[in-house]
Amino acid sequence: MRKSILLILFAIILISLCSCELSMEKPKQGKVHILVYGNDYSGTSSPLSYTVNDAVQVGRVLSKLSVKQNCEYETFFIYGSSLESIKYDKIITNDGINATIYHDLSWPFLQKMLAKLKDSSEEGDLVFTFFSGHGRSSITKQVPYGTDTSKKGVFCVSDTDVSVSDISDLIEDIPGTKVVFSDFCFSGSFVQAGYVSVTGNEYSSMDATKLFGLRSKICEKSSTFYLSASRYYQLSREHESIKHGYFTKALLEAFGWDEDKGELVLGKAYKDGKITFFDVANYIVNNDNESRQNPMFSGGSNDIILFSF
């Protein structure tokens, strides 16, 4: 008798749970916005070899992941590479993705495109930006925790050196969750020492009590996540054998991109049906294969899911 009562109670609970689950509406899936910028400075005294390929392949894999996730998305490619642009234009056009291609590398145009993202994005959307090119900084060594490095670093947009702080401010104004990938020298300027996620040995020499006290005064910008190729005082490097920057190569591996076939494979950061920001960052930190640069990442205290399927 007691067993029968327990079975009936279990059945009632099960039916109630199922009813609640069926009555719940499926959460709205936000739109994905993707903007990649790659400049190889063709015709200048300091050209780069693979920055455009970096941007193109990152834009492709993020687009393909959006398709696989079956979500609405838009991708903007901004790159310049003399005759190489023709080759990449054809690849992207035939890729079967929702993409728009631009070759205006100027700062006013990049400002315009970031403003476009601001207008088209909503809370709940996911916004990816990627920057590959030259960078400079007046900081050449580690600075005290809490220092705003973004005002000391610049990204070379065409013939204009633009403060990383100015780019960051425009991105912060975009609604939704923002993820910023950067592969240029001193790109850790994006990851201000004022709210950096303390990883590796970056601040191991600092007294723990002092570190905690400083951190408690910091307001983290939880809606924006940064992942940079190098620290704010380091160069970022590329290599002939991999046809990419070391950072970008690892980023593509984390997402699962077969560049030769133009297809998705099992990403190194893919776990339990999803790809999260922290898993991507951790893979790159341990697998960029260049000891002279150390990636940095920051954002909110919680991880975020970038893609799930």
Image: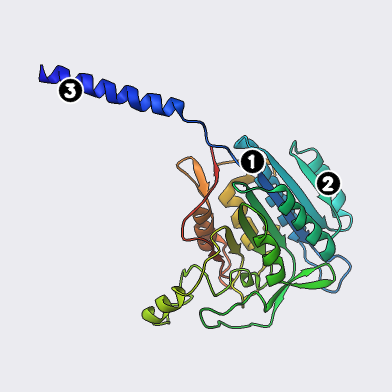
Q: Disc 3 to disc 1, how far (Cα)?
A: 46 Å
Q: Residues within 10 Å of mark 3 (few under 14, many from 20)?
A: few
Query: As drawn, is 256 to the left or to the right of 244?
Result: left
Asked if 248 appears above or below 200 in the picture, the reply is: above
x and y percent of residue 164 in the render?
69, 71
Q: Disc 3 to disc 2, how far (Cα)?
A: 66 Å
Tag 1, which secondary structure?
A: helix
Q: Amino acid at mark 3?
A: Leu
Q: Earlier in the sequence, mark 3 or mark 1?
A: 3
- Marks 3 & 1, CB-CB < 8 Å contact: no
Tag 2, which secondary structure?
A: helix
Residue depth check, mark 1 versus mark 2: number of the one nearer the observer:
1
Q: Which mark is residue 6?
A: 3
Q: Residues within 10 Å of mark 2 (few under 14, many from 20)?
A: some
Q: Earlier in the sequence, mark 1 or mark 2?
A: 1
The residue under the point 55% across, 82% down is 142
Task: Name the residue that disc number 2 marks.
Answer: 89
Task: Name the residue that disc number 1 marks.
Answer: 66
